[in-house]
Amino acid sequence: MTPLFVFPPTADCVEIISGIRSVKILKRVGSPNGMWTRDPRSSKVYVFNGTSGDTIHQFDSVRDFSRSPDAIGSRQIRLPSDWTSPGSAVYNGYLYYVEQGEDMDVQVVKYDLMSGSVTDIAMFPVESQASVYSLNPEIVADLAADDEGLWLLYAMSDSEPNIYLAKMDPTTLDIEQIWDTRCPRENAEAAFVVCGTVYVVYNTRLASRSRIQCLFDVNDMVVSEEAPLIYFPRRYGAHASLKYNPEEKQLYGWDDGYQIIYRLTMKRKLLV
């Protein structure tokens, strides 16, 4: 797909992942499916248990979360509508989550975590309820935040084999640009965005070792065929979600109910 226009690369955001430096298994809480993430602009941690619901749990820090049994000690936030699938993002004090309407349309909701109110809702024009990742069929759209802003990963239709990427304005939720990443949905379990580059993680139906096997860079500074194949350390099952924190250069993973932190090794894109 030809982009509407090209974003200039962010001057201080020209890095690509070269490896996984370390892994920390924090704890196990909740169901096999879920997500957890940290707001890059604060220390607060947010936990989404399951595949849908109207409640999330907020902890003051990763340390507080790791020390708490289950959700005890958290602040429970009741949302005005259900979030659908582990595809939410927290960015600059706002929660962005996917909601499916009565007619199964996909909506992106912007929720102010400070005031506790919805500030915007945008209908996203997808033609079907096709899953973004074939190994996580409950995810019909996956929001991601990185150094360059807010993104949405989705499937254009049931018949379209590739994952699509939309750049969204975090203030208005307007769609600014759309790309065909050319990364297949088949055998994909999760994806995330770092410095405008999409990393798609693949696995098998009988969960084995997850691996980053396809990249797409919106600034055309990285060619997927030249990027290294990166394997995740062996764990428990398969990733239900992976969320990147640009301040820490870490991934927050949810694996069969385990909460995991992956520390990443980076290098400049131009050296790939």
Image (tube, rainbow, N blue to C red):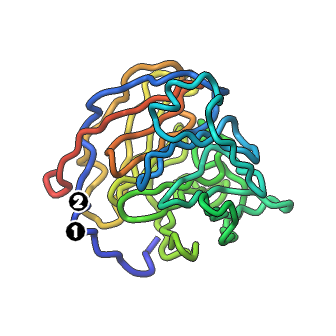
From this view, report whether residue 247 is shown above or below residue 47: below
Quadrant of the image occupied by residue 96:
bottom right
Looking at the image, residue 149 sits to the left or right of residue 35; the answer is left
Looking at the image, residue 85 sits to the left or right of residue 28; the answer is right
* Residue 187 in the image, given as x and y percentages of width and height: 53, 37
Tag of residue 11: 1
Instruction: Name the residue at 60% across, 58% down.
Output: 113
* Residue 26 in the image, given as x and y percentages of width and height: 46, 24
Let me know if residue 19 appears in the view. Answer: yes
- In depth, the one of 89 and 272 nearer the eye is 89
The number of numbered badges drawn on the structure is 2
Tag of residue 64: none
Q: Marks 2 and 1: CB-CB under 8 Å?
A: yes
Dot 1 amino acid type: Ala
Dot 2 amino acid type: Val
Please, what secondary structure does the residue beneath circle 1 have? loop
Quadrant of the image occupied by residue 98:
bottom right
Tag of residue 14: 2
- In depth, the one of 230 and 176 nearer the eye is 176
